[in-house]
Image: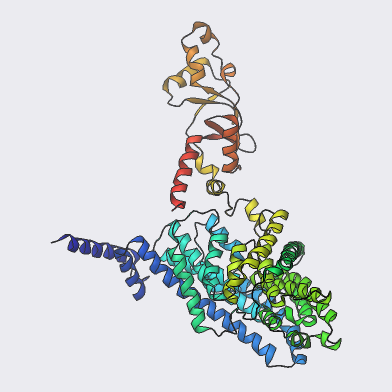
Amino acid sequence: MNRSSIKKFYNFLKFRRNFTRYGLRKARSYEIVLFWLKSILNRTQFLILSGILVGITCGLAGVVLKSLVHYIHYVITYKVHFEEQVLFHTLFPFLGIVLTTLVVLFIFKGQDRKGIPAILYEIAQNSSVVSSVKMYSQIVQSAITVGLGGSAGLESPIAVTGAAIGSNFAQTYKLDYRERTLLLAAGATAGIASAFNAPIAGMMFAFEILLTGVVFSDFLPLVVAAVCGSLVSKVLLKESVLFQFSTRTPFDYHNIPFYLLLGILCGLYGRYYVLIAKYVDQWFHHLKFGRIQKAAIGGAILSVLCVLYPPLFGEGYDTIKAITNGQIQEVIANSFFQFIGYHEWVVIVFVLLICLLKAFSASITIFSGGNGGNFAPSLFAGGLVGYAFALVCKQLGIPNVPESNLVIVGMAGVMSGVLYAPLTAIFLIAESTSGYDLFIPLMMVSVISFSIAKWFSSISPDLENLARQGKIFTREHDRNLLSLLYVPDLIDKDVQLVDVHASRDELAELIRTGKRNMISVIDGKKLVGIISMDDIRPLLFSDAGYDLLGISHLAKPPATVINEFDNVYTVVKKFDETGAWNLPVVKVDGEFVGFISKSAVLNSYRQLLRSHSG
């Protein structure tokens, strides 16, 4: 039997063992095939295959959600008159938030962790294991919320759904943490790519937001997942459903002053947006009502806003498309502003009011109980900021204002300032508009806006609380790994103890029979000090020293102590500050628990570094 035959026979035996281990009840026909493929393919080949399958699945999920919501909005916007729209805008947003809250409470048992923070939390705190429920719960919840007029976006729910699909695929085929995280990111990448038909933007989203602080050398699964997700939406979705813009003018370097000013405006608006979101979140958090009552309050407020300003209804992409196509009169005709009349300053006031209120409507939708994200609201608001800026410039008599370009580039600017994702914003707008000739203004505006946002807050306010608690990864890679270590797991409780009032003979016996280099001196259960063998050894061979072998004289207070609730980052700082190799751990009441050695921390860190780096 030649070597090739032996290898095939070995692979067959391995497949048979795995098939028996996983059991017939769990096996499906396609799973049997995939388990067999896993046994004969190498790691890279199987990951590429996994990326293709995850990408197609996530692309289909994105298509289903986008199509459903788009159809509902199409019926309300184009099939009924304004008077009937008022009725829909009064009732639907309220129902959307309340129904979503009821679904979360009674169908999904209160599991409402949502948005990008949810994905980052699972990566850092749950070894990239995402509940299988999230493969469909986010679609159901966001379809109800946004489909019925919630002023939020579908992209974050699609990303969470994709992450859940990728994670559960990896769990099914018993992949380790590195591969699981990679496929989680691939799923989210495919979701974003399908939502916008923008594969490069999907990849930038993964590298810029999801894989922050996690070192991976693999990227091919992300590429194929992004391509597959984008192709699925391209084939199955109509262009009217996709986030696509075709109206623009070529870039002219003489217009650079416009883009510089727009970058500043986008950065300031982005800061306004995140502050409003923070305020609304705190307001709902402190309300002394149950979740259903909060949803009713939020839904009622949102309904009022949508009646007064219909562009706040839903994602708002149709409004931006109408504006870029010069159809602002149609937008105003579907609002109460039609009774005021069409004048340039009326349009400016109308647009500015929508800009200011979009931050409120999106935050109310998300924090009162709805499900959605800030992708669409930030793009919507950015387009309106650019449009308002262009109108003001025209009113001031400034010639050659690149109106459509300012709308398009403004979307990238506000998205950069709100999501802290300038690369994602740049490639998203470039791909969605086929506006690669606008790369220079896109980069200028996005970088300025992002820099202003970073000047106010070094980390996205959306992630600030989790980052402060050490529950998500940041760009400090060492600190990320240390956050995965837990003090209780590092404590050595096999220690030598002696009472402070013990006799010299008891101490001598402990020294003679003990195997540790340190003896902990306690009074009851509290730590008094530490006796080191290095300190006591010279005294053992000195008559004068032996007379001084009183325990209270020999015990030295530790350089510092570790509290049982300290995080490992604090522990490392204490080791650095004291230069000690071993430090005692005590409870809040002073009870001695054991020791942590620098060796234990370093060994655990090395193991994590090995498993988290590619």
Residue at the spot 62% in from the left edge and 63% down from the top edge = 422
| Image coordinates for residue 534, horizontal then vertical, percent | 49, 20
Q: Is residue 2 visible?
A: yes
55 vs 416: above or below: below
Which residue is drawn at the image coordinates 44% and 24% (left, top)? Answer: 514
The residue lying at 66 percent from left, 60 percent from top is 447
Applied colour scheme: rainbow
Whether 320 is drawn above or below 572: the answer is below
Q: Would you say residue 188 is visible in this rendering? A: no
604 or 217: nearer the eye?
217
Residue 283 screen position, x and y as percent: 77, 63
- Lateral position of residue 389 relative to residue 1, left or right: right
From the viewer's side, name the closer residue of 581 and 396. 396
Q: Quadrant of residue 320?
A: bottom right
- Callout count: 0
Q: Quadrant of residue 486?
A: top right
Q: Position of residue 7 (x, y in %)?
A: 22, 61
Q: Position of residue 425 (x, y in %)?
A: 62, 67
Judged from this view, the residue extending furthest toward the top is: 543
Q: Residue furthest front?
A: 254
Q: Is residue 469 above or below residue 519?
A: below
Q: Residue at x 85, y 88 (%)?
A: 339
Left-right relation of 346 to 11: right
Q: Front-most of 560 and 220?
A: 220
Quarter of the image with the N terminus is bottom left
